[in-house]
Image: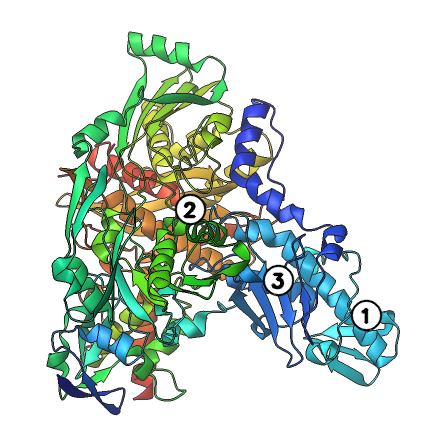
Amino acid sequence: MSASKSKKKGLRRRKFLKYSGIGLGLIIGGGYLSRHMWRRSIFEIAESAIVPYNGNLSPNIWFQITPANEIILHSSKVEMGQGTFTGLAQLAAEELEVEVEKIKVVHADTASGNIDGMSTGGSLSIATLWQPVREMAATMREMLKQKAAEKLGVGIADLKVENGVISAGGNALTYGEVVEGVTDWEFPDTPKLKEAKDFKYIGKPVARVDLHDKVVGAPMFGIDVEVPDMLHASVVRPEKIDAKLKSVDSSKAASMPGVIKIVEEKDFVGVIAETHVQAENARNALKVEWEINKSWDLAEVRAMTKVGNGKLTVIQKEGDAKSILDDAEEEGSVVKLEFNTPIGAHAQIEPNGATALVKDGKATVWLSTQVPLITLNEVSDRLGMDKENVNIIPKFLGGGFGRRLHTPNAVQAALMSKAIGRPVKCFFDRKQEFQNDTFRPPTHHIVRGKLDANGNIEAIGHDFSSGDVAFNSALMPPIAGTILGADIGAIRGGAIQYRSIPNIRAESWHVDLPFATSWWRSLGLLANTFAIESSIDELAIKAQKNPVDFRLSHIEDNEAGKRLRNVIKTCAEKAGYTDEVVNGRAMGFAASTDAGSPCAQVVEVSVVDNQIKVHKVTAVLDCGIAVNPDQVRAQVEGCIIMGISASMFEQMDLKDNKLFPVIYGPYQMAMMRDAPKEIDVVLIEGADFAGPVGEPPLGPIGAAIGNAVRRITGKRLTDLPMSLA
Amino acid sequence: MKISFNINGSAQTVDVDEKTPLLWVVRDLLDLKGTKFGCGKAACGACTLHVDGESVRSCSFPVKYAAGKDITTIEGLSSGDALHAVQQAWKEEIVPQCGYCQPGFMMATAAMLDKIPNPTDEDIDNNIVNICRCGTYYRMRKAIHRAAEIKNTNS
Ligand code: FES
Ligand code: FES
């Protein structure tokens, strides 16, 4: 993947930041490609051809073709709605020369050995597998051809491969017929891949491979797992932050209907019962005491999350922005805005949970997880079992968004199953989901800008403060903070993308908050872009310039700049952007670049009785090759609506150590009536690889709405969720 | 206590505490997993099914009120292999992302179309009040209008 484009200025820092965001995937993506590695991990399962991808000798599986002519793609990436299964099927179909719908995509369980060393997240699934999956599929095709040639008694060059059939002269074999009886496979060198102009499936808006199952309500999610003889459990979770379990009185609960066992562990208490409802009822009857370390409320958290507090890392530095802005502030010629964004909940609809069976020295856990490897490690560590004896079986996720990067449920279910010797299913209730979320951290931003005599930006500074995103995450080594300096999640979108501004400075301040915060779709992008792009508009207004032209005039002349300029221009044209208010409606413009994919958005907004309404959004995204344009569009639409929800409605509060609200409704989110009736998505393929899609479009939306409201009301909204009242 | 009802066209009798939410009877006793749990407090709509043709949030509907009634879940929305107009429209518009909320939305939509065959955007806003975290509302609205079209053509 071309993750890095050379830059004239600030090369080292920028390059480093890019790599830490996207490069982790590169290591995995590139690691298993060499022919050598493939050779070492060859193995056969009777009568099926399985091509592994990993270097070790455990059964690492990507593809499987059975004599019954089933073509199965075992995906180490999980499907959480982002359409990865469909994209992977398209990539595979292209080189396997078989129709997309003939490929069945399933989650690889960890026992198969096809384990993603990282997570499913960061918009990286297709981006990092774009090349490897095609190479594996192409290799697989060549292997099939070799055997077909033998079986048909012809030379490889005489074979024709089309729609899953290999033929020569009048004879033809399906892939199933080719693999029948073969136990001995030879791995050729990785063949040359098709060129884009020859793509049959890539770039086509094929229907999602999971569409039918999702329309008929098939039992595919983690919570749907059913195992014979299964019991149900419910656990106690802290209702307060900064609290430790002190004591539990289970006398009443133990004698309630259906209760089979109460399991007390060092960090949780669980009730196992015949049914889910019985388990919950009994759990509610437990008398639990917590030891509160210190009392907390929201005001304290807000006071902590301030630029100037905690640990500072300068993430971008060009020229001498600081002294220019300090001087300008003193003489009163600076534009200075302060922004705040709230604690955000993931609020995915399927709660976290797991079903486990621990018996006879083996453990199996079924669940919705974004991190099968971490789940595997946690379960095997806590149970003191070798990893070979633990199998994690990922299921379809009822939403991910970063919420399933932490899976304590797996350990809980496993310990309870071990205690009772039967399968146990256990999942959080909605209150626990809200109270024990790993939240999007609150943020605070100060943006300062100074115009030169021609009304161009002479200097700009973005200083921001955030709690953990990547830090203290199981995804990162504990020393990540020391090595990386800045929290690589919190700084997403924090740098200024208008690189021809001569003086730029971005400072990231990191605070330790008294509750867990972590990855939330797009990480820091939503908050950072809200602050920066609102400020850019404010500077344009001060300069009396059209905000689109204003942005265009500050973009650097290089490859990334070319792509950014293109999305901005295209978006303004497509939307017919004007900075005038027409019939009570105003347009708002914003753009961001995330993980290399630039996105621009124009929103059409009205304000009636202080109520903001978004009528239309035009979005232009350049993600390089769109493997499935329909699903890329779906991701853009989803990001826009999730972004509207986060910018206009959502916030968590904190009082007496309790985080709340703990239910939908009071935790207000965008609903049908709040979704724009028109969303016009334009895709630009400005690069020759498949780039990140699932998060970049979350950047502009908040600022775009704020910028439209500013034009209607004259009021600059600086806090999320937005309120005019 | 023993409670009898019809579900997806067949008679069923369950022996269960009468206060048990219908959702858990459907999911765990009858093993129909298409009806989803999202909140347990009638706040998200993931558990929507039909009781005598009315859209009901089954997480907050004690099973005793189902006695003698006709229940339809997403598994019973289609007739055999022929998908319901709502499901067909959902497929045409490729609505689902993670898919978890979708059965609830489809059930709510099917019940609405029985009462309002040609819903306006406002009807949709007022009647379809479930929550989708993936943000598929935009496509859902299109699919709802399309489902109305399909249904009106078929009938
Ligand atoms: S689960 Fe019933 S409304 Fe949410
Ligand atoms: S499709 Fe995921 S919650 Fe609606």
**Residue appearing at x 43%, y 64% in the figure:** A395
N-terminal-most mark, 2 or 1: 1
Per the rendering, the mark at residue A697 is: 2
Q: Is mark 1 within 8 Å of ligand 2?
A: no
**In the rendered structure, which amino acid carries the disc numbered 2?**
Pro
Q: What is the secondary structure assignment of the residue under circle 3?
A: loop
Q: What is the secondary structure assignment of the residue under circle 2?
A: helix
* Residue A451 falls in image quadrant: top left
N-terminal-most mark, 2 or 3: 3
Number of marks drawn: 3
Provide the residue designation for mark 3.
A62
Q: CA distance from mark 3 to mark 1?
A: 20 Å
Whether labels 2 and 3 share one chain: yes
Q: Position of residue A400 (x, y in %)?
A: 39, 54
Provide the residue designation for mark 1.
A146
**Is A109 positioned to the left or the right of A341 in the image?**
right
Q: Position of residue A407 (x, y in %)?
A: 38, 52
Decide if residue A488 is in sight here: yes
**In the rendered structure, which amino acid carries the disc numbered 1?**
Gln
* Residue A299 falls in image quadrant: top left
**In the rendered structure, which amino acid carries the disc numbered 3?**
Trp
Neighbour class for label 1 at 10 Å: few (<14), some, many (≥20)?
many
Neighbour class for label 2 at 10 Å: few (<14), some, many (≥20)?
many
